[in-house]
Image: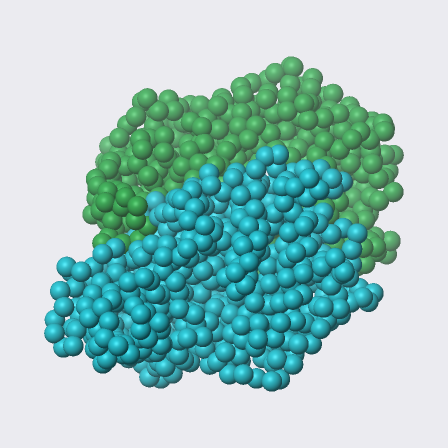
Chain colours: A green, B cyan
């Protein structure tokens, strides 16, 4: 069982400006516009079976592959995001749209439960013949997450019933029994979805199927290799099973490799199973993998994946900036994984990196207006990198939407002996705890300010621990309890401040996390960041973008080490943000007329640099940007 | 007519160690081993026609293209290099080999003179149908250069006769006449070869054909476009005629674009024609192009070409280091072009850049042992870039060999009123000048030392100018004439020191070009070199290579601006060179255990850096290297 249980987002009201605005944008803009895109790009049309398959919207590449095979997952993920939106505001029109999709899916489903619109529409004879590449089980996972979410939002069972039949079929098809295939997902995802189904229905067989997929992965003889031998002329473009993390059994894995989203979805399921089944071996593997990726293969923006070619990891400390991949889905998946780790152990790094991935790489994936997206995300751009309105593989669009729409679910956990606060901002919840009901009201302008006021309102006075995450960046945090100084340093354990007392109605904790512009340096082995510095303020990593810096040539800017970083409230930018300003220098081309090289160093001139939070870049057209700034 | 005429290399003896060693290596190792490679890779076999065409050694790429179509040019270029070698040492065995090739070529030649072994062997019906891509006229040019060189070396005419017949056929085929094709080479080269033929035979029609090709290039209607329309399904991978510099008439060109070798071979021919025909328009175009490339698109190593995709130029100041293309052939071609510019105007930049391209990017193209090569040449390597023993497109191997074997030809020019010294080193020559014969004896350990002693021995006392190039890097040059101080500053004009006097036998000039380690900076627009410095000593650009720097991690080294650069004679390296040493610093990973980012900057520790001349890198296995070093 989970030691710490996240409070469901449906029990958390977001009352603050920061998340209030983001959630509202997703509800008002992202979810409806994504529906329109699904219509425009024939995705919803692909559910209407049987019919002659139309021309491919996204033609096959030279290897015969098209991203169109994951369309089911886009439908599932959109239903999930839309269902989360329904918790904020019921909306009959959206529900009607979802019901229509569910009707199509029900009609498409075979009597034996099989349900994959690509295969049913185009190559029914080939189902379950290429788990490695063709995302059948991945699609099932996203449809299942959608069905669970829609049932939770509306109580309507039809989609859930359809998906439970499909899961039954999958459970019959795959396993270690005599007539079963010993396969598992080529793109992990169904595993974590099955655990959500288990958590909804309590049926242990769902957990068992997830555990089977996790434990079978990477066993020998290798399923994907056997399967490939049965496909004449098979070509595995990625060349290595590290790509899908089936290169060895998952319990033996301690190095984060391959495709980042596959990896993190799998680790999420592993951590879920470790908690649910009290499985020490899986937990240990998760801890090793966590340590590995956060110490060697993570961008300062909480992005993951250095390389486009495998959408994933390369080698330790290889973190190029202009070509960083940092897929939005990967940091969304990191948020999932970090949350699952927090279900087992209350450790600051899990919460810190959840926050780092969320506020930076993940939020950057959605435009300020909520209708444009990033897939891959460089940390440095010459201005050519643009947001898209739709993508041949639109996975990130719905992923960031479903996370933001359910963000309240990452704020609090409860345990036997207390209440834990992971994220800060304006929020309120009412929880069952220590034998009573406890109202919690958080007030804060976080992430712009580190002043956080928390009021607890237990129905009956109750003794329990209130645990508050003290982020790694917040040195010198202070706290008042009902106006009296609380000795923070004496009560922080592993990144969480433990205030244990008898709480009565109206007790107030005022936490102050000192928030100022700060410099961050990368490990010396990160060659690409040598001589460079990144700027951070609170949980936000900053970048310099051309739009705020006149004609200063950003690539030849140099920030003296001693220059102060001034926080400036800017009500004129993005409905009010805090920028960082610094006096820096940049090269001038004085005296270079006609010369390409010379023995005299180029002169520098003073410039004022303005940095904005990374998550806001590329909202004023595409223009040059850098996270890592040359330091002198 | 040329105002300044280069002294033929056959009249120059190399007596010094530096060029003596390089020339000897080419004669002893490069020329024989290249012959063996031509045999091994079936190149010589391809001359034996008619016969059924064998399997392609280098299969066609996805566009149906194989580098095997330039094999004739490799043969021509090898014959040229071997012929230059014969001037140093006659060698009956080599001559027999060349004669056998010539016999094959003669047999292959059609009665009408056509001679291209690719087309004759594989698709005779398609000759002259794809000038843009298929190198027919380029191959003709290299065969012609080989024929001219072999005739000059041996006096044997057969190859020259064959090639004159082929040139006659080409002259009949191409031109502005009624039944002629208005085509020109897709890869320029024949133009400059025709001028060599003219300079050998004095037949004006050869010059006229060269001038036709130059003047027709880029006229409308565009020949390559018309030709492409006649090829069903034609695909032009490069997409733009800038690639082959036919995007506009050459006289209107002032921007260096496209494929670097094509460009520089063309500019060489343009400068030749400008001199031979006293053509002010062509001269002006050459000057504009020279100014453009040297001010915006040249690597500090005298390499050219920023991009592999077009083997050429991209945009101004785009000079990436790890992915620099810098094909050996391009800097060889720059040496040709610079020499042709010096035939018209005695200007320091022409000589300086000739020297820069020669001593750095060009010499780097040949290994110390003379049997391994670079095609593309990065200015920074993580250790993965290796020399090759042979290449599907081995053009650079024979190009560097033919240049080194004839290097004496770049030392001196004569003019109506004097003798000009462009390059320094141990050399001797006997020249006709000012109505008498003048012996010149140069003694120097150049490029390791800037002390140069020149003795003139005119048969009769004669008044003329001795002009000595004062390189741009040599500030504070001094000179003694017969032991007496000569006022250098008063007599330098445009980079050349003019010593005019009545010279008598045994007159001696001692020139001292102060040579010390120096720092070079790149124009601020070269973003890739921001915060970095290159090291130079005399004409040599240096690099730091791992082999000389223990376990110092070169990418995180920083050279303080005030650190001295110490020249150190190292007899143990490469038969004796001068290295540069400096006290620098590098990052340490102390205190980073388990951390990827932190707020404290990484510490640095002192290291001693040793730099070697760039041309010598990658001779001790492939290992990390950098020309541009971080400066602090």
Q: Nearer the viewer, residue B516 or B420?
A: B420
Residue shown at the point (48%, 36%) measured from the top left: A384
**Number of residue marks:** 0
Query: Relative to the observer, which residue lies in front, B4 or B523?
Result: B4
Where is residue B150? Give x, y as percent: 57, 72
Q: Residue at x 69, y 39 (%)?
A: B178
Asked where in the image residue A149 lies, by quadrant, the reply is: top right
**How far across and how far down the image is residue B516, in percent?**
23, 69
Residue drawn at 40 percent across, 38 percent down: A625
Q: Nearer the viewer, residue A345 or B51?
A: B51
**Residue in front for this viewpoint, A328 or B222:** B222
Percent position of residue A266, x then y: 61, 49
Answer with left or right where residue A229 lies relative to residue B201: right
User: Looking at the picture, does residue A361 appear above or below residue B332?
Assistant: above
* Rendered image quadrant of residue B78: bottom right
Single out the residue that lies furthest toward the top.
Answer: A92
């Amino acid at each position: 069982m989970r030691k710490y249980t996240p409070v469901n987002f449906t029990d958390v009201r977001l009352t603050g400006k920061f998340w209030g605005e983001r959630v509202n944008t997703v509800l008002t803009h992202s979810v409806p516009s994504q529906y329109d895109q699904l219509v425009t790009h024939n995705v919803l049309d692909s559910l209407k079976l049987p019919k002659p398959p139309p021309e491919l919207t996204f033609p096959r590449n030279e290897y015969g592959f098209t991203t169109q095979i994951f369309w089911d997952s886009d439908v599932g993920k959109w239903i999930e995001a839309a269902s989360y939106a329904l918790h904020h505001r019921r909306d009959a029109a959206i529900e009607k749209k979802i019901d229509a999709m569910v009707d199509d899916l029900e009609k498409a489903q075979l009597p034996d439960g099989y349900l994959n619109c690509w295969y049913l529409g185009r190559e029914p004879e080939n189902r379950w013949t290429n788990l490695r590449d063709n995302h059948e089980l991945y699609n099932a996972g996203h449809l299942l997450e959608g069905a669970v979410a829609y049932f939770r939002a509306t109580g309507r069972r039809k989609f859930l019933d359809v998906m439970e039949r499909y899961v039954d079929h999958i459970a019959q098809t795959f396993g270690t029994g005599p007539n079963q295939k010993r396969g598992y997902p080529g793109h992990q995802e169904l595993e974590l979805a099955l655990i959500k189904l288990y958590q909804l229905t309590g049926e242990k067989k769902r957990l068992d199927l997830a555990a089977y997929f996790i434990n079978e992965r990477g066993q020998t003889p290798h399923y994907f290799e056997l399967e490939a031998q049965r496909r004449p002329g098979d070509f595995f473009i990625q060349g290595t099973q590290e790509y899908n993390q089936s290169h060895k059994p998952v319990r033996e894995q301690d190095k984060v490799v391959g495709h980042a989203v596959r990896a993190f979805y799998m680790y999420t399921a592993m951590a879920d199973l470790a908690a649910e089944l009290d499985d020490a071996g899986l937990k240990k593997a998760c801890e090793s993998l966590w340590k590995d990726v956060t110490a060697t293969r993570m961008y300062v923006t909480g992005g993951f994946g250095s390389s486009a070619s495998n959408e994933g990891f390369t080698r330790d400390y290889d973190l190029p900036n202009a070509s960083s991949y940092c897929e939005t889905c990967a940091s969304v998946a990191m948020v999932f994984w970090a949350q699952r780790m927090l279900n087992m152990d209350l450790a600051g790094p899990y919460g810190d990196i959840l926050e780092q991935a969320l506020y930076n790489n993940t939020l950057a994936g959605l435009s300020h207006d909520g209708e444009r997206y990033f897939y891959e995300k460089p940390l440095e751009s010459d201005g050519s990198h643009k947001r898209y309105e739709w993508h041949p593989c639109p996975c990130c669009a719905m992923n960031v939407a479903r996370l933001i729409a359910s963000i309240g679910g990452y704020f609090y956990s409860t345990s036997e002996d207390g209440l834990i606060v992971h994220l800060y901002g304006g929020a309120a919840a009412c929880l069952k705890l220590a034998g009573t009901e406890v109202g919690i009201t958080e007030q804060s302008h976080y992430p712009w300010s580190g002043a956080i006021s928390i009021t607890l309102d237990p129905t009956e006075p109750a003794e329990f621990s209130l645990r508050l995450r003290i982020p790694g960046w917040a040195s010198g945090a202070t706290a008042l309890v009902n106006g009296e100084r609380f000795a923070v340093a004496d009560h922080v354990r592993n990144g969480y401040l433990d205030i244990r007392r008898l709480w009565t109605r109206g007790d107030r904790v005022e936490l102050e996390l000192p928030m100022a512009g700060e410099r961050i340096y990368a490990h010396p082995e990160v060659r690409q960041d040598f001589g460079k510095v990144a700027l951070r303020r609170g949980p936000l990593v900053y970048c310099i973008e051309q739009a705020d810096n006149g004609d200063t040539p950003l690539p030849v800017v140099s920030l003296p080490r001693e220059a102060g970083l001034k926080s400036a409230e800017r009500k004129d930018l993005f409905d009010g943000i805090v920028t960082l300003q610094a006096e820096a220098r940049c090269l001038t081309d004085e005296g270079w007329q006609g010369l390409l090289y010379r023995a005299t160093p180029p002169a520098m001139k003073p410039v004022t640099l303005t940095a904005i939070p990374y998550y806001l870049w590329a909202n004023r057209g595409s223009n040059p940007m850098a996270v890592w700034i040359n330091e002198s």
